């Protein structure tokens, strides 16, 4: 399957724009990494200590064009620099560790929400106007309208603080040593439940709404009527004929929603002190850690573009009628 040069050009322009914006955004914040490190030292900020900091990170205070050229040179050589906050660790080391936790959290939430949302949307469309649809559809609108921070704080207070059913935060019990064993994985699972439930309402609401709208259109097609005329069961017609073909808009919507999902994961990880990209971005912003902020924003942008690119390919493969649109 070929992708047209025009579409590739759109992705290239979007990536170039993101590179420039990722460089500018951190520098719009007041202060600098050197100022933040000196402030953290407090009374220990002797002239010798300040000079040592400037000697190690002084390039961040260079003229803006020099910084930009160094930034582009680093991207060209796949060198994202050294973290200010987590020195002497490199940006790649910091982001690699955080990315694994965010991927685990986001993928788990997406898979869970996709299964629930698609089933609810298909049943709502099949029983359009019925009691089930009357309850589920308005509830879905409410679910994706509630800000993640409200859901996160509510779930944290109810299930972790008040009822104490789940851990308050972090990715696993700090007293455990990470390893390939049941105790560690069970701890990871328990610590992930509340963050996943925080991300899920928005996703379930979006998937249900999109699936319902797409399914209603599909149910009016001739091949669905033919399936009913053959005497197939309602379940077979609903899922084999209707839901399978109605999934295409849901896949497209998923790619478009990735930015919002990452945004929700940032809030979720901060509230639950979950060591993913969201918490890393927050701590890097407080420390004015330009290299980490730049690297993370670029990583999130590339993930979103890659997801859209992948959906373009999958969409054309699943629906041959659309192949001409991506060639």
Image (cartoon, helix red, strand yellow):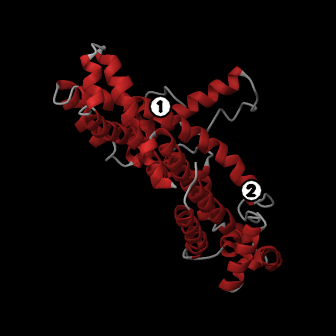
User: Looking at the picture, how far across and down is residue 192, in whole percent?
Assistant: 55, 34
User: In this view of the protein, which residue sits in the foreground, 279 or 157?
Assistant: 279
Q: CA distance from mark 2 to mark 1?
A: 29 Å
* Label placed on residue 92: 2
User: In this view of the protein, which residue sits in the foreground, 41 or 217?
Assistant: 217
User: In this view of the protein, which residue sits in the foreground, 163 or 307?
Assistant: 307
Residue receiving disc 1: 112
Q: Is residue 231 left or right of residue 271?
A: left
Q: Is residue 115 left or right of residue 58?
A: left
Q: Secondary structure at mark 2?
A: helix
Is 241 above or below relative to 91? above
Question: What residue is drawn where x is 69% and y is 27%?
Answer: 184
Question: What residue is drawn where x is 76% and y is 53%?
Answer: 93
The reply to whether residue 169 is in sight is: no
The reply to whether residue 89 is in sight is: yes
Task: Compare marks 2 and 1 and give the one earlier in the sequence.
Answer: 2
């Amino acid at each position: 399957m070929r992708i047209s040069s025009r579409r590739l050009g759109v992705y290239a322009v979007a990536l170039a724009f993101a590179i420039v914006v990722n460089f500018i955004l951190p520098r719009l914040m007041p202060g600098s990494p050197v100022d933040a490190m000196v402030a953290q030292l407090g009374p220990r900020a002797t002239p010798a200590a300040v000079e040592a900091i400037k000697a190690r990170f002084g390039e961040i205070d260079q003229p803006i064009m020099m910084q930009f050229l160094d930034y582009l040179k680093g991207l060209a050589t796949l060198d994202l620099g050294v973290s200010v906050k987590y020195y002497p660790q490199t940006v790649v080391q910091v982001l690699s560790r955080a990315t694994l936790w965010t991927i685990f959290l986001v993928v788990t939430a997406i898979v869970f929400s996709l299964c629930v949302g698609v089933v609810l949307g298909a049943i709502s469309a099949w029983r359009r106007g019925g009691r089930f649809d009357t309850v589920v559809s308005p509830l879905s609108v409410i679910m994706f309208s509630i800000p993640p921070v409200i859901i996160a704080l509510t779930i944290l207070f109810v299930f972790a603080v008040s009822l104490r059913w789940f851990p308050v935060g972090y990715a696993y019990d700090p007293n455990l040593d990470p390893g390939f064993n049941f105790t560690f994985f069970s701890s990871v699972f328990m610590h992930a439940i509340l963050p996943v439930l925080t991300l899920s309402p928005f996703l379930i609401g979006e998937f249900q709404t999109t699936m319902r709208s797409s399914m209603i259109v599909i149910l009016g097609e001739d091949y669905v009527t033919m399936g009913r005329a053959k005497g197939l069961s309602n379940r077979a017609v609903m899922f084999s004929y209707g839901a399978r073909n109605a999934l295409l808009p849901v896949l497209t919507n998923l790619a478009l929603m990735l930015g919002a999902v990452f945004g929700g994961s940032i809030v979720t990880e901060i509230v639950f002190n979950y060591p993913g990209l969201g918490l890393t971005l927050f701590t890097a912003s407080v420390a004015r850690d330009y290299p980490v902020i730049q690297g993370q924003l670029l990583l999130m942008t590339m993930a979103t573009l890659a997801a859209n690119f992948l959906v373009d390919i999958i969409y054309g493969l699943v629906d041959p009628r659309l192949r001409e649109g991506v060639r």
